[in-house]
Amino acid sequence: MESTHHGLWVIAVSIILGLLAAIYPLHDSLAWSRPDWLLLILMFWLLAVPEHVGIVLCWVCGFIQDILLGVVIGQNAFSLAVIAYIVQVSYQQLRMFSVRKQAALIGLLELFRILVDQWAQNINGVAHTHWLIFLPTLTTALMWLLVRPLLSWCQRHLMS
Amino acid sequence: MFSKPPSSGGRLLLLGGLSLVLILVGSRLEVLAPLRTQLSALSVPFYWLVDVPARISEQSRGMFSSRKELIEENQALRAESLILNAKLQKYIELRAENVRLRELMNSAERVNDTVVVAEVIAVASDPNRHMLMVDKGSRHGAFVGQPVIDAKGLLGQIIDVGLMYSRVLMIADSAHAIPVRVSRNGLRAIAEGTGRIDELNLAHVAATTDIQVGDLLVSSGLGGRFPSGYPVGEVTQVAIDPGKPFAEVRARPMAELDRSRNVLLVFSERPEVE
């Protein structure tokens, strides 16, 4: 049993880095295309170690993200909890997907997250939005091609 | 290893339902306000960490800036201070005159607003929203609804106060609106944020109204949240379509919303309207 809990700090550190990347100031031209690092990192751990990362942890991470960003409390918590559920009931099939297919799926999940964000902000008074808000769908999907090998390297070398 | 964790559906129903309730009523319930203040303390270490690279680069620039640059900057500042002092002499005279005239007219004397300088430590990472984090909180007397200005004009208001940090909603955010008047003729209007950092929209301006490109908009003080007389924006576009009941009036914020590193929190003497 000792070995299963060994290296959980890697998960914690990666999640904290993901939260920091979500608030790190970017230049205006890059800000629209900021990938959803938290979703990418949580997706990896949901698929890799479903016995450690589940709905509750994802909800807590989303809740912290809501507080950090100063947005409507609950919007990221809600979308991450739903995504965690979807992955948890089907991770055995999703693991078998090719990397590209996984990336496409993550783009779709990111779209879901953006739509939830927009809905939550609209009913709380934000009226106008720009169509560029959908750009992270693309960048998040592309970043999966980078994040997956990186985190699986971490998992192999730091967690065993 | 391959067994599913128990009752993930139940957890989703519980947590998903909780977050939906929070989205729908979280910002409207006054009961939750102190809780939000407590929770926002959680973000302090994150913003401190994120600000580290900016602080390092600023410090190293300070260390390595040459003597010549410093002398030049010093001279420029001296010149600016001289000009401002010269302007101030006139201002003191005008102020005394203004008070005398107001006394003659039996109207109340305007109180002087005091300000506290705050440093911007972060901007909202969502480019669709226009919010700032500043390094003054309830410990320094900041409160929700407090007006924030910069050297050029009105910047926004505080919407969230922590112990050491507060969050400022800027006038260009699409969730923000401010009562203004045209300084040329006293016409009242509401300036709404459009979500674009360089644009405000004047709502419900009748098509026959006297408003021109170049007019200065100042805060009117109506609504009791902002003190009156601070510059808000300059009218940049007036489009009158005979088919529509209202003119489409756009303005550019006077405050440098995308540039300010230091902002001023305004403490007015007038009673706050809740």
Image: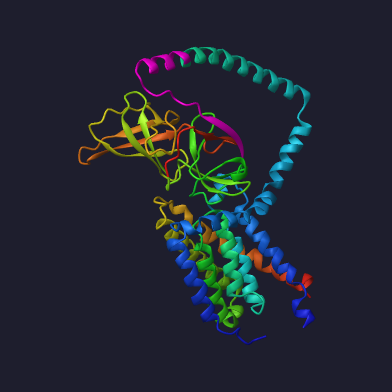
> Furthest residue to the bottom?
B3
Q: Is residue A59 visible?
A: yes
Q: Nearer the viewer, residue B167 or B258?
A: B167
In this picture the colour scheme is rainbow
> Would residue B52 be counted in the magenta stretch?
no
**B63 left or right of A62 in image:** right
Q: Nearer the viewer, residue B93 or A50?
A: B93
Magenta stretch, residue numbers: B96-119
The number of discs equals 0
Q: Position of residue B230 (x, y in %)?
A: 45, 29
Rendered view: B56 above or below B229: below
Rendered view: B83 above or below A111: above
Q: Position of residue A149 (x, y in %)?
A: 69, 68
> Would residue B107 be counted in the magenta stretch?
yes
Quadrant of the image containing the C terminus of chain B: top left
Residue drawn at the location 44% of the way across and 60% of the way down: A120
Q: Is residue A34 visible?
A: no
Residue drawn at the location 54% of the way across and 78% of the way down: B11
Residue drawn at the location 51% of the way across and 49% of the way down: B127
